Image (cartoon, rainbow, N blue to C red):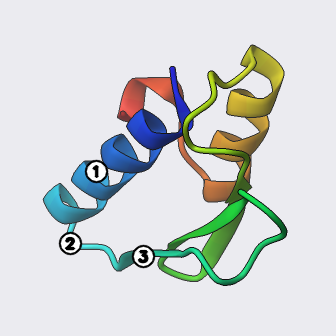
């Protein structure tokens, strides 16, 4: 899954569950962006790149989600 697809899926999950979700492209070094889901956050590496399995699982854990939620 690419970083941009991950962001879209989290945004869709937030909309369905009436949660606040936003992406801050200015907060992050280089091509990294910060993804907020209510009071939780995670850093998404270059959204154009493919996410590695461990990175994806860590980001889901930081947001309190599972892959099944998306």
Question: Closer to the camera: disc 1 or disc 3?
Answer: 3
Q: Which quadrant of the view contains residue 29? A: bottom right
Label at residue 18: 2
Look at the picture and state if 49 lies above or below 26. above
- The image position of residue 25, as x and y in percent, is 58, 74
Dot 3: within a 10 Å radius of its alpha carbon, few (fewer than 14), some, or many (20 or more) residues? Answer: some
Nearest the camera: 26 or 43? 26
Look at the picture and state if 55 lies above or below 32. above
Look at the picture and state if 44 lies above or below 36. above
Look at the picture and state if 6 lies above or below 51. below
Work out whether mark 2 precedes mark 1 in sequence or the reverse, and give the earlier one: 1
Label at residue 13: 1
> Residue reaching furthest front?
30
Label at residue 49: none
Residue underneath mark 3: 22
Determine contact: label 1, label 3, CB under 8 Å.
no
Nearest the camera: 63 or 35? 35
Q: Tell me the residue at 33%/41% (across/down).
A: 9
C-alpha span from label 2 to label 3: 13 Å
Q: Which quadrant of the view contains residue 60? A: top right
Determine contact: label 2, label 3, CB under 8 Å.
no
């Amino acid at each position: 899954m690419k970083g941009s697809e991950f962001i879209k899926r989290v945004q869709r999950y937030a909309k369905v569950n009436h949660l606040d979700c936003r992406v801050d492209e200015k907060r992050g070094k280089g091509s990294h962006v910060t993804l907020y889901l209510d009071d939780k956050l995670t850093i998404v590496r270059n959204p154009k790149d493919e996410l590695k399995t461990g990175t994806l699982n860590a980001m889901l854990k930081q947001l309190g989600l599972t892959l099944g939620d998306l």
